[in-house]
Amino acid sequence: MLTDITEPDSDVNEVARPTGARADAEHLVVALDQWLTDTLGGDAGARIDEVTVPDSSGMSSDTVLVDATWTDGDEDGRSPRAHRLVARLAPLADAMPVFPRYDLGLQAQIMRLVAERSPVPVPRVLWHEASEEPLGREFLIMDRVDGLIPADVMPYNFEGWVFDATAEQRATLQQSAVQILADLHSIPQPWILCPPLARTSAGPATAPVTADQALRAHLAQQRAYYEWASDGGPRSPLIERALDQLDATKPTIEGDAVLCWGDSRIGNIIFRDFRPAAVLDWEMVTLGPRELDLGWMIFLHRFFEDIAAMAELPGLPDLLRRADVAAHYSSSTGHEVRHLDWFITYAALRQAVIMYRIQRRTIAFGAAEAAADPDDMIMHRAGLEAMLAGTYWTDLAAKGL
């Protein structure tokens, strides 16, 4: 089955991604056809057959499906062949982007690096076009990968193929997802393999970047991101309190930094037979402690579980439990997972800033009214407040979760 980026989505994406930010399919067919012909040369007979703009194209960029044909060399000569592709386009400036920078060149570099240096499956990157001239914005083109993605809408723990799976199938999904992090984190000296990441982590590319250095830099970047996201709008006392509290309680992390996926959640993985076929969405890639990715993977599932609890739905409480994730990661890598509660709370803060920014977009484009209390712009406000108070996990334990 085709990845669920082609399936209809709910109004959530309509709010997050205004129609003015969507790629125009007819324009893209013409512009991409000319670009592909120029790129491959006239003898390749390149043409764009179809461009499809999915409803669920994402919040931070436009993702479009491209069917193309061009001539490849083979043993029997040169014959035209169909190619099923995905194009990711940088967001338009007037779409009030979720992130201040959208470095498609870095994403392309990282995916190629991961493919070369690890067993982590990623889509093959064919081209990165840095010039905005062909389409009016930067873009990259990858091979399309078939499979299933755990849905955000309706959430995979409400209904669908993950919810309907057997316990054994979900165990396979969980273990293989955690193994992605173990394999990714095993790539040696990522600060040398990808110098741009080292520069953002306050370390020279030739010297090891420690996990502690990377975490300090990441915290500083997170505070800067909040300042950018809130510029010209209401301040969030909860986010500011969380930034201060997490900064004051930041653990000291030993060892070198690793290559962190950044957006390490199962909703960014294409699965086949409950095993990863492709790992997607590298826009939040960074250097950091291993627990940065582990905390994000655990929290994003808890995010959906808390929504299920509010809706009085059963959810999937046995999936991606923090003890199980830590145990599998440790057994695979030999690394002792530490300070996990801090990193899960940090993930909740990071998600809060993203959701705050998305809600500001919603208000700016007239799809919602401003809340009297800016903290109400954060969907998981209660969960973040409980984490900061130290009661989140004890409350879950009291409920037998």
Image (tube, grey):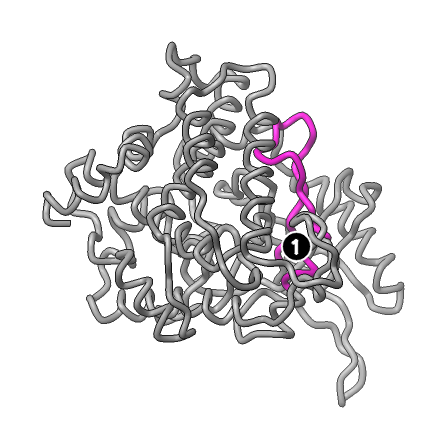
Q: Per the image, is 288 magenta? A: no
Residue 329 drawn at (x, y percent): 37, 68
In this image, 46 relative to 391: left or right? right
Above-or-below relation of 121 to 36: below
How far from the left and from the top, in percent, is residue 297? 39, 53
Q: Nearer the viewer, residue 371 or 245?
A: 245
Residue 162 visible in the shown view: yes
Please state which of residues 205 and 88 is positioned toward the viewer in this rendering: 205
The residue range painted magenta reads: 86-111
- What residue lies at 36% left-to-right and 70% top-to-bottom? 330
Q: Quadrant of residue 312?
A: top left
Q: Position of residue 354 (x, y in %)?
A: 49, 34
Amino acid type of disc 1?
Gln
Residue 122 quadrant: bottom right
Q: Residues within 10 Å of mark 1 (few under 14, many from 20)?
A: some
Q: Position of residue 212 (x, y in %)?
A: 54, 53
Which of the 4 quarters of the picture holds residue 117? bottom right
Q: Which residue is depicted at the point 71% across and 44% down? A: 28
Could you tell me which residue is drawn at 45 percent across and 43 percent down? 250
Q: Quadrant of the N terminus?
A: bottom left
Which residue corresponds to mark 1?
107
Element type at marker 1?
A: helix
The residue lying at 33 percent from left, 48 percent from top is 341
* Residue positioned most to the top: 372
